[in-house]
């Protein structure tokens, strides 16, 4: 699956959803870990 290495440019809704979920999880992780 080469789509995992590319930014969220997926043509299918599934790839876009996976990309958004990954970005949201990463942002939440950074926000939760930031103040420490």
Image (spheres, rainbow, N blue to C red):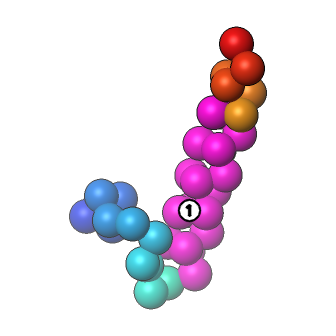
Q: Is residue 18 left or right of residue 29?
A: left
Query: In the structure shown, which secondary structural element does the residue marked by tag 1 occupy?
Result: helix
In terms of image quadrants, where is residue 14? bottom right
Quarter of the figure with the N terminus:
bottom left
Q: Is residue 5 above or below residue 35?
A: below
Question: Any magenta on residue 27?
Answer: yes
Instruction: Answer with left or right where residue 24 lies relative to residue 9.
Output: right
The residue segment tinted magenta is: 13-30
Q: Farthest left residue?
A: 2
Q: Is residue 12 toward the left or the right of residue 27 in the image?
A: left
Label 1 sits on residue: 18
Q: Is residue 12 above or below residue 30?
A: below
Residues packed near mark 1 inside 10 Å, few (<14), some (14 to 19) or many (20 plus): some
In percent of width and height, residue 4 lies at 35, 59
Residue furthest to the front in view is 35
Residue 3 in the image: x percent, y percent? 33, 67
Q: Residue at x 55, y 73 (%)?
A: 16
All told, the count of numbered labels is 1
Quarter of image, res 6: bottom left
Q: Is residue 23 left or right of residue 1?
A: right
Dominant secondary-structure state across the stretch colored magenta? helix
Q: Residue furthest top?
A: 36
Q: Is residue 11 magenta?
A: no
The residue shown at (46%, 70%) is: 8
Figure quadrant of residue 33:
top right
Q: Position of residue 36 (x, y in %)?
A: 70, 13
Is the residue 17 above or below the residue 24 in the image? below
């Amino acid at each position: 699956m080469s789509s995992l290495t590319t930014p969220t440019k997926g043509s299918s809704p599934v790839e876009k959803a996976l990309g958004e979920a990954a970005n949201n999880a990463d942002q939440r992780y950074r926000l939760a870990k930031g103040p420490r």
